[in-house]
Image (tube, rainbow, N blue to C red):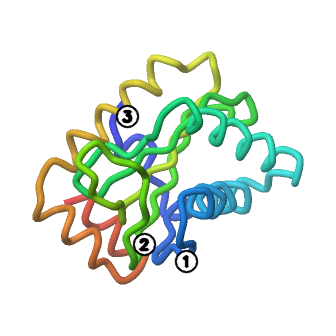
Amino acid sequence: MILLDVLDKDLVKVPLTASDKNGIIAELVEVVAKAKGYTTQQSEAILDAVLDRESLGSTGIGNGIAIPHAKTNVVKHVTMVVGVSRFPVDFVSPDDQKSRIFFLVLAPSSEASAHVELLASIARTCTSSVFRRMLEQSKDKDEVVRLFME
């Protein structure tokens, strides 16, 4: 599974407005909950799963990118939310850089291998510093989607 397999304009938010790690995660979860029509209980279950995973170790991967993720059976298939913040947020990345580009990845337990493949695809896609800078400067979700499609 690659990033383009799950990229969905309705699951992109630019700019994110939260200023801390938990706020960013909650905002990304809110995007998927609204787009998919999840109930408050389902949304809270997703948020709990992501925060539980985050408590095991930060999902900041460096170079200004964080990939909070979790397995939850609220989602039926691997789902990805992309968010870009105007302001750097501390996700305790190994390179000590704050993050501005976020990918929330959710997967049902039955799709664990696709989940791992998507995480790897995101990391590969974002290796270019030019690409990351263009993402950080994107004005809206259409621009984000266009960058990934090019």
Residue at 39 percent of width and 79 percent of height: 86
**Looking at the image, do the residues carrying marks 3 and 1 touch, with CB atoms under 8 Å apart?**
no
* CA separation in Å, label 2 and label 3: 20 Å
Identity of the residue furthest to the bottom in this view: 139
* CA separation in Å, label 3 and label 1: 24 Å
The residue singled out by tag 1 in the image is 17
Which is nearer the N-term, disc 2 or disc 1? 1
Residue 119 is labelled as 3
Above or below — where is 111 with respect to 92?
above
Residue type highlighted by circle 2: Ser
Q: Secondary structure at mark 1?
A: loop
Q: Nearer the viewer, mark 3 or mark 1?
A: 1
Residue at 54 percent of width and 34 percent of height: 78
* CA separation in Å, label 2 and label 1: 7 Å
Closest to the observer, 66 or 79 = 66
Give the left or right position of residue 50, taking residue 93 as reference: right
Query: In the rendered view of the protein, which quadrant contains the C terminus?
Result: bottom left
Residue type highlighted by circle 3: Leu
The spot of residue 14 in percent (x, y) is 46, 75
The spot of residue 54 in percent (x, y) is 56, 39
Residue type highlighted by circle 1: Thr
The spot of residue 58 in percent (x, y) is 46, 40
Tag 3: Cα neighbours inside 10 Å, few (<14), some, or many (≥20)?
A: many
Closest to the observer, 33 or 52 = 52
The residue singled out by tag 2 in the image is 85
Which is nearer the N-term, disc 3 or disc 1? 1
Give the left or right position of residue 136, taking residue 9 as reference: left
Which is nearer the N-term, disc 2 or disc 3? 2
